[in-house]
Image (cartoon, helix red, strand yellow):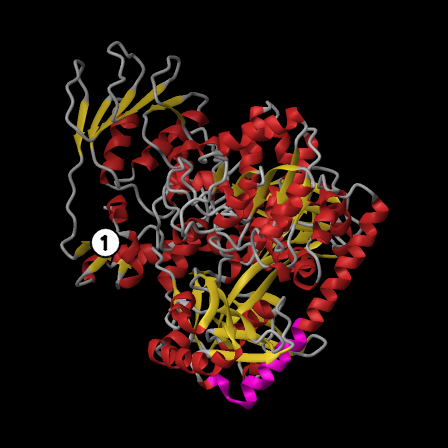
Amino acid sequence: MRNTRWIYKNNTLNNKSNLNIDKDIIELLHNRGITDDQEIYSFINCSLDNIRDPFTLKDVDIAVDRIIQAKDKNESIWIYGDYDVDGITSTSLWYLALLEIGITPNYYIPLRDEGYGLNKDAMKYIADNGGKVIITVDCGISSHDEIKYANELGLDVIVTDHHEINHGNPPALAVINPKREDNLFPFKYLAGVGTSFMVLYALYTKLNIKDEIFKYIDIPAIGTVADIVPLVEENRIFTKFGMEKLKRSESLGLRMLIKKIFEDYDVRHFTTYDIGFIIAPIFNAAGRLEDAKKAVELLIEKDHVKCTEIINHLLQNNSERKEIQQDIFEQAVDIIEKEKLYENSIIIVAKEKFHHGVIGIVASKILDRYYKPTIIMEIKKGEGIATASCRSIEGFNMIEAIDKFGNLLTKYGGHSGAAGFSIKIENIPIFSQKLIEYANSSLSETNLIKPIKIDISIPSYKISYDFINKLSTLEPFGFGNPSPIFSLPNCEISNIRAIGQEKNHIMFNVKKDNVEIRNCVWFNSDDVFTEFVEFTHADIAFKLKMETYKNKYQYKMYVEDVQLPQHKENIISKEITLYNTIFPLETVIYTRKKLSSNNINLVFHDNEVDVTSNRSYLTTLDNQTSYILTELKNKYGYDFTVAIKDIILTDENYNIHIVIDKNYKFTSYSLKVGELFTQIKNFLIGDFNYNSIQKNILASIFKNKQNTLVYTTKNRGINTVLQTIGLFYSNIGKKALCVTSESLSAKTLAMIEINNTYIEGYDFYIFINTKDIPNNLKSPHLILSEDKINLSKPYNIIEDKFDIPKNVVFITDDLLIQKTPVFSRKLPITKRKSILSNLLNYSVLYSTKDILIYI
């Protein structure tokens, strides 16, 4: 198979969190450095209100005041942009936002041949055409001489940029850059368009119309994704809410483009893939092959006919870009294969007529194919130079590498992962030789093995509507918040076939634990087809996506890599994952029957679960949901409730969204107290017995009718005592109240009323580690305390005394999968019973403190 190595991120088995969130979702957030419950909550529930105060960016106040002054004096404002998507969207955002407040700005975007950034000819052109204020977007931080020249021409320059500040701030009226060290604004990684948005947010705030700026938030979403900045903090907010706005954009041209390129635009859940690989390249093609101003024209145009013309032009441009790009890619691969350039640790290809607008994309594709640092050069014989685009892998800092031989270059810049330079043609051979020697000595064999970074291994039943829907709360995915890669070990593989016009992709089916996932896709994998077709079982690394087909949801595995089974599965880990399932679960069922009632039920058969309404069969749950419910019922004795969340009528079916939760409802019609207690006990703990402290407490309360004071510690099954008391009183038509500020299990909360202070009117009270106990309390009550307390009235005092078997060694949850034999309440009931009945026969038993519940 491919030359890859799988790297599992540092996972813990049981991340500590008090949030009712899927443990795997918590794990994914921990992998991203989001570990605090408040951080987790804010990340999942981010809103526009989370955008920080824009005035904490240095010089924003100066810029805002100058723009308002220009508006009042009717002075000409010019926006100076850049020819990439970040520059295009920044220019368009400023144009639309200024137009909204009564300013009609001009804009200038240099052609690619003019080079990046400000130039003096442009400054002169703007001054000659009446310009008074220039707002630079996505550029300007390094243009010291040009801005000095603009000042001499009487122009006020406001710089909005996000690039590194290598030579101090230029002599502009205002310099807004998130990387300024004197900012109070803490986030340094805004895109150019994000920086522009923050300045405009400040401007709209000063004008008391701050919420109006959010109507344009789809534009910074496009530029932010395209510029590959980390999708966290403000960038994540711009992108998340911007993608939701795409189909109802304020930009007529963008709305029309969306309708043109996405057939399902009206119902589509837009993703960063849609922006990064479909929308942004269309804009980028304008700047790469022609004039980026065409893309700006589309975003600001108000006329339908003109928008149609521009869209057709841009799409034609993009098609040409794809053809040119593919042609150059094929030429580069041909050179690499014929000259065996892949034997070097860095691949360098130089040729005439390699269009400079696409060589960066080609370098990325070459890197993906060979997983080696790559440099693609366009030789310009007429000018005597070559221009290059560079892309690199982990462990090889491209800008540091070319800097070592910078004396051979005429100009260069960039960062560790991507760079560019110009070089005299006669220097190419010696530069290439030295760089290859440097790379060969710097890179180890391990560096050149492509890492597949896996977040977590998940069970097959997680490839479901419920989990993928929960996973969507972490979107948008992209740089800095990557789409998670999962693994599924030791799967059964079947129906392997080549697909695609060029037969360069592989599709196959996966089966694991009675769950089958069909039509898994592995793109651009034709190089391993002959080997893979012999596989019967494999470990699979993949990304998850939910799609719709004929108005039904499909759970798709997009394969990143495949290898022969490497590791034996840990059964304990599998059982703990099942036990940790967070309820409620949500799924969708499909039926052509119109429901006559909203009352629906689940009926279990072997490995399937049917859904019925008024005893009439509706459908069978998908095999993922059926599997998890059946396993939890059989192994842990769970029962479930089901409710309808939504019913959507489609052309094909009624799509019924249902919510499945644990059923904590207990009903008894027994008239005898003894029978009632037996039924409650069987409902709560099944075949297990109450432990010693539970028996003593319940006997003191119900048999001896005594007010009881209990000294006990945690992990002794006190929740079961509370549940027993709550169920008993509710079933005889009375009420019990538990007074505590401690957090209790969801099961307990469903069975007894809880409050953090005493309330009159209850028939029985339980006080847990609280001093809020009335002196004149006449109702029967139970006091549970970890510490000794002095009370005026007499109580039956119970001190919890127990012996821990000497062969029991306590461990934490995260060590359960590393030890054997082990005990935990997370094990299935039959396993727990077997271990407890043979407890003294083990020379050593590793256990969590859960075992104290059973002693």
Q: Is residue 721 magenta?
A: no
Residue position for label 1:
811
Task: State the image coordinates of residue 110 (x, y, percent, origin top left).
Answer: 64, 54
Seen from the viewer's position, the closer of residues 607 and 585 is: 585
Tell me the residue at 41%/76% (across/down): 448
Return the x and y of residue 385 as percentages of the image width and height.
55, 74
Give the extent of the magenta segment. Answer: 325-342
Asked whether the viewer can see residue 780, the reply is yes
Query: x%, y% of residue 679?
Result: 42, 38
Q: Nearer the viewer, residue 401 or 844?
A: 401
Residue type, mark 1 in image: Ile
Q: Magenta stretch: dominant SS? A: helix
Left or right: residue 280 compared with residue 678 = right
- As displayed, is residue 712 above or below residue 855? above
The one of 464 and 10 positioned closer to us in this rendering: 10
Q: Is residue 621 left or right of residue 801?
A: right
- What residue appears at the point 68 percent right and 79 percent down from the top-left corner? 503
Work out whether 493 lies above or below 726: below
Tell me where residue 792 sits by quadrant: top left
